[in-house]
Image (cartoon, rainbow, N blue to C red):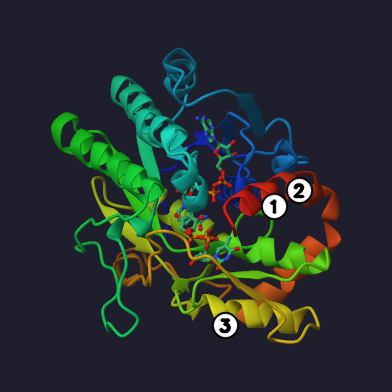
Amino acid sequence: MADTFEPRNIVVTGGCGFIGSNFVRWVAREHPEVHVTVLDKLTYAGNPANIAGLPADRVELVVGDICDAGLVDGLVAGADAVVHYAAESHNDNSIADPAPFVRTNVEGTFTLIEACRRYGVRYHHVSTDEVYGDLALDDPARFTEETPYRPSSPYSSTKAASDMLVRAWVRTYGLAATISNCSNNYGPYQHVEKFIPRQITNIIDGVRPRLYGDGLNVRDWIHTEDHSSAVWAILTRGRIGETYLIGADGERSNADVLRAILRCMGQPEDAFDRVRDRPGHDRRYAIDPTKLRRELGWEPKLTDFSRGLAATVAWYCENEDWWRPAKEATEARYRAQGQ
Ligand code: NAD
Ligand code: TDX
């Protein structure tokens, strides 16, 4: 399907994080006509190495805070579109210290949409399925665009708040915005605090993986490449003011994912420890992506989870230089939480 909006200059916030950097590399590969300005504060989760080696005339990094209205104004004024990935993204951190989540996720979004409103710039808001709360394991339902918001954690409540700001700006000011709510991403460049990279790197280090609670919680996994193609489809062909759910029919329990990692790495399937559960731990997420598929003709490509997981394991085995510097501090934080 042909793109109906053809941006040439886009600002990608959080483009040095996991999903943002995968999107930047995807755009550089698939759309060489597009210039990308990455705006990233380089928090503990941001790493310029994630976008290193891309053509300097097409991808530029500006180090700064999305809450800095003056900086944001200058960048947005010269752009056709803003794709907003920057966030504090980790649930466990939000439970330990919610303050940066409110600031970056709520105030940061406010700063960006104000600038987009001022300059009439197209805005795409990257959000999460966690805004819908959770489902019971035996519930036949999946989340749709009509599911009421019911966030559980400090992280997901700040993402829900940011979605609400965008919806209000669309209705009140006519902001040219779309919103996507995606399920759990996996793939290369994901921080070692997250479930899959944490367990892979623990096994590399000879440390037993850690499963929260009974491990029956279900997450709906999608490869980050498929998330990127979906965001591009929505940015260029989505209807203004609409929300699209992104998912690839990838529901799996944490215990199953962990056993698959152990198998893939030649370990016994029971070589893990159960640890203290996450407070307020959501039971199950599940996305119904019908609207995105029907309306925009989007289809995920990397739907073979075992293959994607094996490639991800191989990436962490081959890129120890990338993750090693973050590992010790991350595990120290978990130790302090009894996890
Ligand atoms: P991440 O933590 O890996 O990356 C976040 C990036 O944002 C980092 O580069 C960080 O430096 C930057 N950042 C943080 N605060 C900033 C600020 N104030 N100003 C500028 N930059 C700042 O996160 P991720 O997992 O890549 O998630 C990216 C986005 O996708 C988030 O909005 C998240 O809510 C959403 N999302 C994530 C998932 C997932 O599975 N990880 C699923 C659905 C949606
Ligand atoms: O060591 C662990 N053991 C464990 O059992 C860790 C780190 C996690 N878990 C469990 C908790 C979750 O049920 O694994 C599941 C996945 O955990 P995370 O990787 O922390 O992801 P989650 O909390 O599901 O949130 C992710 O998906 C939605 C992203 O971090 C969010 O940014 C996104 O919005």
- Residue 273 location (% of width, % of height): 65, 74
Label 3 CB less than 8 angstroms from ligand 2: no
- Specify the label residue 311 is tagged with: none
- Residue 247 location (% of width, % of height): 42, 68
- The answer to whether the residue labelled 2 contacts the one labelled 1, judged by CB atoms less than 8 Å apart, is yes
User: Which secondary structure lies at badge 1?
Assistant: helix
Amino acid under label 3?
Asp
Q: Is residue 330 visible?
A: yes
* Residue at (27% x, 84% y) in the render: 140
Q: For the residue carrying disc 2, how many other residues have a C-alpha within 10 Å: few (<14), some (14-19), or many (20+)?
A: few
Q: Is residue 184 above or below residue 272?
A: above
User: Which secondary structure lies at badge 2?
Assistant: helix
Amino acid under label 1?
Glu
User: Marks 2 and 1, how far apart in space?
Assistant: 5 Å
Q: Is residue 304 visible?
A: no
Q: Residue tagged by mark 1?
A: 331
The numbered mark, 1 or 3, whose residue comes first in the sequence reads 3
Q: Residue tagged by mark 2?
A: 328
- Residue 298 location (% of width, % of height): 42, 67
Q: Tell me if 218 is positioned left or right of 106 in this view.
A: right
User: Which secondary structure lies at badge 3?
Assistant: helix
* Residue at (69% x, 39% y) in the render: 47
Label 1 CB less than 8 angstroms from ligand 2: no
The numbered mark, 2 or 3, whose residue comes first in the sequence reads 3
Q: For the residue carrying disc 3, how many other residues have a C-alpha within 10 Å: few (<14), some (14-19), or many (20+)?
A: some
* Front-lying residue, 270 or 19: 270
* Residue at (46% x, 33% y) in the render: 100
Q: Depth-wise, is mark 2 or mark 3 nearer the camera? A: 2
